[in-house]
Amino acid sequence: MSSDHQEPDHVGRIMAQWAVERPEVDVSPQGVIGRLHRLAVLLDEELRPVFAAAGLSDGDFDVLAALRRAGAPYELSPGQIAQTTMVTSGAVTKRLDRLEGAGLVLRQTSEDDGRGRRVRLTGRGRELVDGTFERHMANERRLVSLLDEPDRRELARLLEAWGRALDA
């Protein structure tokens, strides 16, 4: 999708205003960062309803999906969940409290280490995450279909390269 010969978008208008008010400052990074930030907000608005329809927050889904991706017996330690979901252990604890209360996960003492804890997806949790995952992927396909295939591949490549550079 080309934006040639179109009116400026929201970020483009902001950049044009800064060009008038502070012409000595290079605002070109806003063309990327500002648009990514805006896109993240818009995407979040498009993604959350799928989780909400399943009675989940996006964070709850993230925990269930991490357990499901772990493979049978669909079990991880709270620390592993925090690492894979990239949130604090406190946030994981709150999510696990909600999910356990809903009967979607079980917290157990580790068989290998009596002091350690393990979190296991219940049968009900697995059914919920599997169905929600299918609807989530259909929703994401809908969203990325707004770009043609070559653009999607190039965008994915660029975002991966940028993410790796920032992680380094």
Image (cartoon, rainbow, N blue to C red):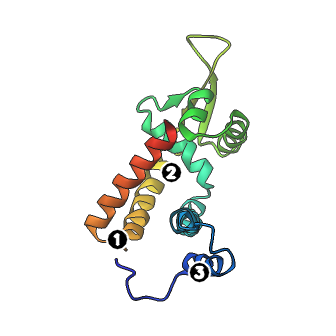
Q: Position of residue 88 (x, y in %)?
A: 68, 37
Which circle's residue, 2 or 1, is located before the other in the chain?
A: 2
Q: Tag 3's secondary structure?
A: helix
The answer to whether residue 117 of the structure is visible from this angle is: yes
Is label 2 or label 1 in front? 1
Which circle's residue, 3 or 1, is located before the other in the chain?
A: 3
Q: Is residue 118 above or below residue 160?
A: above
Is label 2 or label 3 in front? 3
Q: Residues within 10 Å of mark 2 (few under 14, many from 20)?
A: some
Q: Is residue 144 above or below residue 131?
A: below
Identify the amino acid type marked 2. Answer: Leu
Q: Say the numbered circle drawn on residue 16.
A: 3
Q: Say the numbered circle drawn on residue 23.
A: none
Which circle's residue, 2 or 3, is located before the other in the chain?
A: 3
Q: Position of residue 36 (x, y in %)?
A: 53, 63
The answer to whether residue 44 of the structure is visible from this angle is: no
* Quadrant for the N terminus in the image: bottom left
Estimate the spatial distance between the alpha carbons at disc 2 and disc 3, rounded to whole Å.
47 Å
Which residue position holds label 1? 145
Q: Say the numbered circle drawn on residue 128.
A: 2
Q: Tag 1's secondary structure?
A: loop
The residue at 44%/49% (across/down) is 162
Q: Is residue 48 above or below residue 118?
A: below
